[in-house]
Image (cartoon, helix red, strand yellow):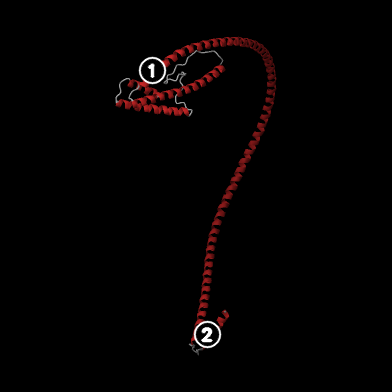
Amino acid sequence: MEAQVDNVHLASVLRTSLNPASVLRVTVILEDSLDQLSIIGALMENGLDPLPNKGGEDDHPSMGFRSKPTSLGNTNVPMNRTRFVSCGLSRLQQSSALKKRKADRQYLWDVLEETRHELEIRGSFENLQRAFKDDKDSKHAFCETLSWEEEEEAKQSIKQLKLEVMTMNQSTEKEVQEYHEVIAELKDQLQNLRTWTTTRSKYMQRRLELQIDEQRRWSLKLENEIRQNSEELEDKLEHWMERYDNDIEDKQQEMNNIKITRANDRTKIQELTKKYMEYESVIIKHELMKEAERKMKEREELEFKSIIKLQAWWRGVRVRKGMVVVVTLSGKKGKGSKGKNSKGKKK
């Protein structure tokens, strides 16, 4: 714990007389230690253990002193019992260690707080010296008590282990006797199995020899049949190869003829396509000319109708204004009458 290291350093500093500057420095160190202890306390309140548990700790609420765990040597108890006991002991040790850390933290925090208060008011550290002395005395007394308790516990453990060893020896002898009986029974079964295996192997060997002879006869028969089929297939293959060659030549000739016919057809198609394009261009030109003539004719008719309407309007204007002139020319009169007749027809 970092606060403990600072406290040891603080104790060495406080053995000398303190001037105001030293008092200020020591006060700052104490305040920093108190802050660290407050943080550790907050972590413990939230169920967290800020320090790993490296061995058993005593239950004395001192300033962080720990005792070494006792070792009773290796035991020969069964594995499942050892695992169960060790798991339970581990949980108890963790719980007691956490409680001890909480008590140590609170004790150390109280001592440092009183020391800081004493330094600020009187500039002395008698409370810290008294706390170190009390802790040293209590630790010495606790170690003496712990040594006696450990000795008694070791005696009880040795007695219990002797009883367990005796029980295990009896159980082992019984198991060895059972193993000997099982081994004798297995030997009898092995002898019976060897006899049965020898008889069965002879029977299987004879049976396999008969099967091999029968299989050999069938193999010879199949070999003759396969040889005959192979000769027939070779004859058929030769026949089909000749037919294949003849068919290939015929098909090649047909393909050449088809290629020639295709080339001729392609030439004819190109010529017909050219003629079609020429005829199509002529037809398009003719259609365009007919369309132009139709549009021109419609335009002329529209212009003619417009001129007739304009002349009629002009005549009406002249009649209304008394500007009519008697035309004596027969040609003009006939033309005018013709225009009226045509106008009447148009209407």
Q: Disc number at residue 291?
A: none
Residue 1 image offset from top left, x and y in percent = 41, 23
**Crowdedness near tag 2: few (<14), some (14–19) or many (≥20) residues, C-alpha within 10 Å:** few
- Seen as rendered, the residue at the extreme front is 122
Chain-order first, disc 2 or disc 1: 1
Using the rendered view, name the quadrant where residue 159 is placed.
top right
Which label sits in the foreground, 2 or 1?
1
For label 1, the residue is 133
- Tell me: 114 left or right of 291: left
Residue 319 image offset from top left, x and y in percent = 50, 86
**SS at circle 2:** helix
Query: The residue under label 1 is which amino acid type?
Result: Lys
Viewer-proximal residue among 115 and 309: 115
- The residue drawn where x is 50% and y is 11% is 152
Viewer-proximal residue among 69 and 308: 69
**From what the image shows, is residue 68 above or below residue 22?**
above
- Tell me: 314 left or right of 194: left
Viewer-proximal residue among 256 and 343: 343
Query: The residue under label 2 is which amino acid type?
Result: Gly
Q: Disc number at residue 336?
A: 2
Tell whether label 1 touches label 2 (CB within 8 Å): no
Residue 166 image offset from top left, x and y in percent = 57, 9
How far is disc 2 from disc 1 in space, using C-alphas?
Answer: 155 Å
State how many labels appear: 2
**From what the image shows, is residue 289 above or below residue 161?**
below
